[in-house]
Image (cartoon, rainbow, N blue to C red):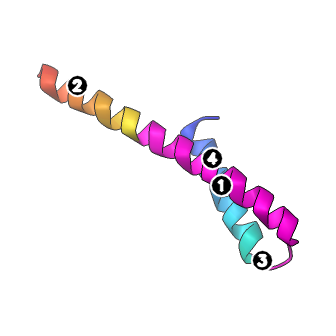
Amino acid sequence: MDFEKAMSRLAEISRLMSSGELSLEQSMKLYAEAAELTKQCREYIQNARLQVEKLEAAE
């Protein structure tokens, strides 16, 4: 999943969890999914930061 789709899914999960209409089990599954998506997004950002640093160093 690319960064934009991951962020969109995180927003959707946040909306669902904020609704107060989920069972505890559903909330826990979504929380686990959100944690994994957050990890992926942090990795995307870190990789992008490294690429920018390499480009700046090459100037």
Question: What residue is pinned by disc 4?
Answer: 36
Earlier along the polypeptide chain: callout 2 or callout 3? 3
| Picture coordinates of residue 8, whole percent (x, y) | 64, 52
Q: Secondary structure at mark 1?
A: helix
The Cα–Cα distance between marks 4 and 2, rounded to whole angstroms, is 27 Å
With 23 as the anchor, is 53 left or right in this view? left
Earlier along the polypeptide chain: callout 1 or callout 2? 1
Earlier along the polypeptide chain: callout 4 or callout 2? 4
| Picture coordinates of residue 38, whole percent (x, y) | 56, 50
Foreground tag (3 vs 1): 1
The residue positioned farthest toward the bottom in the image shown? 20
Question: What residue is pinned by disc 1?
Answer: 34
Question: What residue is pinned by disc 2?
Answer: 54
- Three-letter amino acid code of the residue under disc 2: Lys
**Dominant secondary structure (helix, strand or loop) of the stretch shown in magenta:** helix
Q: Secondary structure at mark 4?
A: helix
| Picture coordinates of residue 19, whole percent (x, y) | 78, 77
The Cα–Cα distance between marks 3 and 4, rounded to whole angstroms, is 21 Å
- Contact, CB < 8 Å: mark 4 with mark 2? no
With 44 as the anchor, is 2 left or right in this view? right
| Picture coordinates of residue 42, whole percent (x, y) | 46, 45
Task: Characterize the local packing of mark 1: few (<14), some (14-19) or many (20 or more) Cα atoms within 10 angstroms.
Answer: many
- Three-letter amino acid code of the residue under disc 4: Glu
- Three-letter amino acid code of the residue under disc 1: Ala
Task: Characterize the local packing of mark 3: few (<14), some (14-19) or many (20 or more) Cα atoms within 10 angstroms.
Answer: few
- Contact, CB < 8 Å: mark 1 with mark 2? no
Quarter containing the N terminus: top right
- Contact, CB < 8 Å: mark 1 with mark 4? yes
Question: What residue is pinned by disc 3?
Answer: 19
Region rendered in magenta: 19-45
The Cα–Cα distance between marks 1 and 2, rounded to whole angstroms, is 30 Å
Nearest the eye: 42 or 59:
42
